Amino acid sequence: MDSRILYRVGFVVRLLLLSALLCGAVVTSASFMPSQRTVEQFRSAVRAGEVDRVSFQSFGPDALAFVVWSESPLVWHEATGDIADSEGPYTKARLMADVGRAPVSPSVEQDRARESPVNNSIFPDWPFRLLGGSYLWWIAAVWVAVFVVMLGSTPRLATRWAWFWLFTVGQIGALLFLVMEPRPLWKGPGEGITSAKRTEGRRGCLYSIALSFVSVAAALGVGQLVKLVLG
């Protein structure tokens, strides 16, 4: 097969993978910046069939600490503080009864992530989990595929160990890898460009720490922007 065709196919695949991860990053960022709502507004949205996902955390035997719900992948709301309405405390039993009567049944799950919020793994949370503990299998599959490609390749800008730290501690290394390896996307399809000096693992680890702060700031900024635009 003509090498030019292979380069073009590889270029298109990189664009598709990058687009999927970017969509996942935006959805995850939006889910971590929900708009404040009341229990009455939540119940009204459920009755209207506008809620597609509900997450809650119990406080005591039946009381709720918070309720988070989405009305679309980018529109997230939460009710916190005094989880009650005119009928009294809004309990798990009442929530399940409301959901059971909804014209469109949303997915419901109890969020246990906030009970142990510390991530004991070096792998990032965002490709795998939404607010409320829901798993994003399609984003996770893309992230894992890019990670495996990185491990099986010979990157030009940094060693595999350096990229490993950027993927994990750096949070958004997978995005950078798709943009930069083996040839910067803005140069179009073509043969990989060699680099005079590659970043080693130790320096990659240091870069990943700095990148992790940039990643958090970017996620908060994107989440806030989505929140302002979509409410």
Image: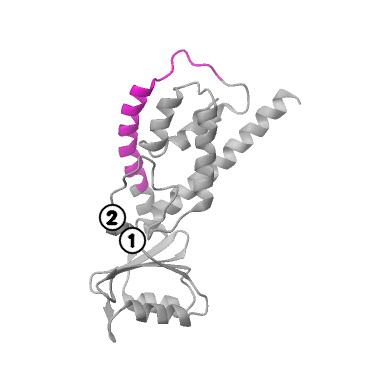
Identify residue type, mark 2.
Ser
Q: Which residue is mark 1?
A: 112
Question: Disc 2 designates what residue?
Answer: 116
**Which residue lies at the image location 44% right of the left edge and 22% below the top edge?**
159
Is 215 a magenta residue? Answer: yes
Check the image and name the residue furthest to the top. 196
Position above or below: 172 against 84: above
In the image, 203 versus 121, the foreground residue is 121
CB contact under 8 Å: marks 1 and 2 = yes
Instruction: Decide whether residue 168 is among the magenta residues.
Output: no
Q: Is residue 18 left or right of residue 133?
A: right
The residues colored magenta run: 193-219
Q: Main secondary structure of the magenta part?
A: helix
**Is 143 rendered above or below residue 138?**
above
Residue drawn at point x = 42 percent, y = 53 percent: 129
Q: Position of residue 6 (x, y in %)?
A: 69, 28
